[in-house]
Amino acid sequence: MTIPTYDTIILGAGAAGLMCAAIAGQRGARVLLVDHADAVGKKILISGGGRCNFTNLHTAPDRYLSANPHFAKSALGRYTAQDFIALVEAYGIAWHEKTLGQLFCDGSAKQIVAMLQAECDKGGVTLALGAPVGAVDHGDGLFRVEIGGRIAAAPALVIATGGPSIPQMGATGFAYDLARRFGLKVVEPRPALVPLTLGGDETLFRSLSGVATEVVAKTGKTGFREAALFTHKGLSGPAILQISSYWRHGETVGIDFLPALASGWLVAAKHARPRATLGGALDNHLPARLAVTLADRLGLEGELGGFTDKRVSEAERQLADWRFSPNGTEGFAKAEVTAGGISTAELSSKTMEARKMPGLYAIGEAVDVTGWLGGYNFQWAWASGYAAGLAIAGA
């Protein structure tokens, strides 16, 4: 039996895999794009509330986490947010900036998937969908992949199967198993951009489920000013999802509940309205339920005028750096992305090719490069896919 041979086999028809396939195919490479799902881009379709937050205007290497913070520079510099915007506009897809440089389709994420599909069609990419991948081996300069019971071969193999976040979409740790199979090291994967859970004495904050307010959330030297949301399990919202990527078990998360107010505001409020209560003062700036809960926890009962300036200042300091001790996260099931992954030390930052295993590439979320919330991870997918696609096609 003759085994069909391609120039590259790409495992994973998500954002990175589709971009890689399109770039390599349009430059003359014979590409086989494989996915266990029955359609391409399924995770793209659910992103951004169905409108796909496809990139961020403020993309820069310092907005990515990695054991090597410099690794992403090359790929991000060669394929920028403006490059992807130009592609989107070439297809007549209307878009808008929502906030903080986050770009969304005016219509639907389906438009982005259709665009990538069309780009693959231009490159003559062969699709193998709904086909589980079996054994993968290498010999005589070729990778051989069992796909739905059949074998295909190519001198180049691309790992673009992402991480284990959102397992209900079929996500697994397949990328890491395959990387280890070929001797590549993996940085311990963990949930990122994920809600944090609270336990013990802090469970009382769960009674605030549904309450949201703008805060600065911080851990260590890293902080984000966006909305935080109390949930029936703990803390969520953009500020919390952002900080979760930096948080480690055993660490605290500091919350400034009143980032818009200047230092000394509460003492000033006391002197202006000495008969006001702390809850009343907070009620002017925070959701009522949150104001009551924080006031109760601080223990300043009665009129503010009955307390010394020192005691009032101490309450203000606590409100500006309220310490939560999360007992965990909601895990990969609720994580938007996976931090960690195939070690960047194993890969060329220019081509995404494995140093120890010529012909083997890793791109997108499978790699130990994790962006902030807001389109950064899509831009990494486009940029890393572009870099590998060019290298595979010899461009």
Image: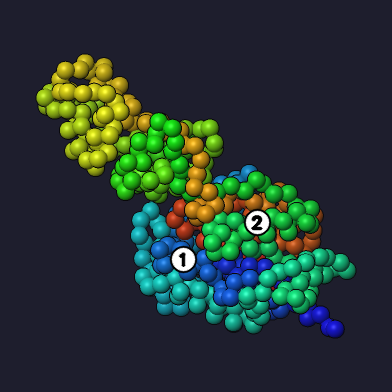
Q: Residues within 10 Å of mark 2 (few under 14, many from 20)?
A: some
Q: Vertically, is 391 above or below 63?
A: below
Identity of the residue drawn at 50% across and 67% down = 44
Q: Residue under circle 2?
A: 173
Q: Is residue 11 visible?
A: yes
- Between residue 153 and residue 289, name the one nearer to us: 289
Q: Vertically, is 310 above or below 218?
A: above
Query: Which quadrant of the rendered structure holds the N terminus?
Result: bottom right
- Between residue 147 and residue 222, name the one nearer to us: 147
Q: Tag 1: residue type?
A: Ile
Element assignment for label 2: loop
**Quarter of the rendering containing residue 29:** bottom right
Q: Vertically, is 91 above or below 301?
A: below
Separation of marks 1 and 2 at Cα, in angstroms:
20 Å
Provide residue 62's location: percent of width, then percent of height.
52, 47
Q: Tag 2: residue type?
A: Gly
Q: Residue under circle 1?
A: 46
